[in-house]
Image: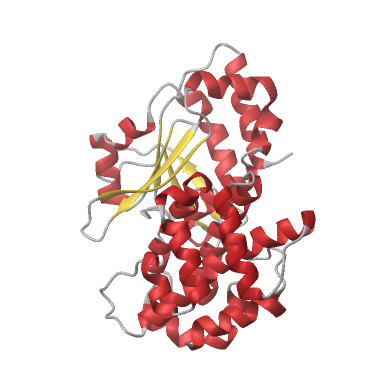
């Protein structure tokens, strides 16, 4: 069983008693689930339910790192705020967007810096933009309605969880790492790889879209090879994702050397930085709304863009070596790096 499967089963079992309070009876399931994912991070992230009122009300939960606890203690050190933000939890009947727009969430955001809003079936991370205003960062819904959610969970919780396990694990870990300043190449690589893995999963599920054929032709011409059969199809889709995400990162590296620290990077201009015809063709096709909208790649590249704009450049480049770019961003998608490293070198050395 997985953390998400356990989460759905616990929700189902409590629901089936017929005696649950719509919101608070499920707090323990949220705590258990978030702790299961949090313990996989370094430092470990722990969820604490019902925080003390520090001046902005009582958040339903807060996310603390292991260093905020005394060794062997279950409560964080007195007076500390949760390093990774807080959570506002409502019942499955509520709408996440309406919860997010509430005055209470606004108070939490101002005080804690990041708020995970959820109704157990839909998760929305809210942070602050460059001007300090509320910004919807990432959202992960399991179902479009309360009725649909309970129908799926009660019918087969494990099968329902299997549809989301990988992508939700990546999402919730990104939530926990949102507030961390990005200064290390390996931390940046983790975020980009997280989005790349999600993108790869989405592309693998996609049917044989006409727009994918255009991308296939572009990559075949660039690599001087042909993707044949089932294995070739898998290799093509892995190569596509790695090219896109390595391309964004490589473009950011080149862009950063030409622009001031307070300027913002935009992945849509990546091909202009790289000056590699194959990359230019790929980004044109992906950025064009009518092409690959169904794949959701644009949204994942947008999220990666936000990560790159969070990097503390001066500290990052003290630790980053261009010659090790592929090593930093090893997405483990089964790509043949003998071929792909040639593309990366062309990106970084233009």
Give the residue furthest to the left: 131
Which residue occupies the foreground of this view, 90 or 50? 90
Q: Position of residue 68 (x, y in %)?
A: 47, 59
**Residue 99, relative to residue 197: is it above or below?**
above
Q: Which residue is drawn at 75% across and 60% down?
A: 232
Among the 4 quarters of the image, the one containing residue 337? bottom right
* Colouring method of the image: secondary structure
Among the 4 quarters of the image, the one containing residue 237? bottom right
Which residue occupies the foreground of this view, 154 or 12? 154
Inspect this view and state whether residue 72 appears: no
Which residue occupies the foreground of this view, 114 or 68? 114
Q: Which residue is drawn at 54% across and 39% down?
A: 31
Left or right position of 347 against 133: right
Q: Where is residue 231 in the image (x, y as percent from the top left)?
A: 78, 58
Q: Where is residue 96 in the image (x, y as percent from the top left)?
A: 38, 32
Q: Residue at x 78, y 54 (%)?
A: 230
**Residue 24, relative to residue 175: is it above or below?**
above
**In the rendered view of the protein, which quadrant contains the N terminus?**
top right
Inspect this view and state whether residue 85 appears: yes
Left or right position of 338 against 28: right
Q: How many marks?
A: 0
Q: Where is residue 322 in the image (x, y as percent from the top left)?
A: 52, 86
Q: Residue at x 40, y 66 (%)?
A: 267
Left or right position of 55 against 173: left
Left or right position of 178 against 326: left
**Residue 348, relative to residue 182: is it above or below?**
below
Give the residue furthest to the top: 18
């Amino acid at each position: 069983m997985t953390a998400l499967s356990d989460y759905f089963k616990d929700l189902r079992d409590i629901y089936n008693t017929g005696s649950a309070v719509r919101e608070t009876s499920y707090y323990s399931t949220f705590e258990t689930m978030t702790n299961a994912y949090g313990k996989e991070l370094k430092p470990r992230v722990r969820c604490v339910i019902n925080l003390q009122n520090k001046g902005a009300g009582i958040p339903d939960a807060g996310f603390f790192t292991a260093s905020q606890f005394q060794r062997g203690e279950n409560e964080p050190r007195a007076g500390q705020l949760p390093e990774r933000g807080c959570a506002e939890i409502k019942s499955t009947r509520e709408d996440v967007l309406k919860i997010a727009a509430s005055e209470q969430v606004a108070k939490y955001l101002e005080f804690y810096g990041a708020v995970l809003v959820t109704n157990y079936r839909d998760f929305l991370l809210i942070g602050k933009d460059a001007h300090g205003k509320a910004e919807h960062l990432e959202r992960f819904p399991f179902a479009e309605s309360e009725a649909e959610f309970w129908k799926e969970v009660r019918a087969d919780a494990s099968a329902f969880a299997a549809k989301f396990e990988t992508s939700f694990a990546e999402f919730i870990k990104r939530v926990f790492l949102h507030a961390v300043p990005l200064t290390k190449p390996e931390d940046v690589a983790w975020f980009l790889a997280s989005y790349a893995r999600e993108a790869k999963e989405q592309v693998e599920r996609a049917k044989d879209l006409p727009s994918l054929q255009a991308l296939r032709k572009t990559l075949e011409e660039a690599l001087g090879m042909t993707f044949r059969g089932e294995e070739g199809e898998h290799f093509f889709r892995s190569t596509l994702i790695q090219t896109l995400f390595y391309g964004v990162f490589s473009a950011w590296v080149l862009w950063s050397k030409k622009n001031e620290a307070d300027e913002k990077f935009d992945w849509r201009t990546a091909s202009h930085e790289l000056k590699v015809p194959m990359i230019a063709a790929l980004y044109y096709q992906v950025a064009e709304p009518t092409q690959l909208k169904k794949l959701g790649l644009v949204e994942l590249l947008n999220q990666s863009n936000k990560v790159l704009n969070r990097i503390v450049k001066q500290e990052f480049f003290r630790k980053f070596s261009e010659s090790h770019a592929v090593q930093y961003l090893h997405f483990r998608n089964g790509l043949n790096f003998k071929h792909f490293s040639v593309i990366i070198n062309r990106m970084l050395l233009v």
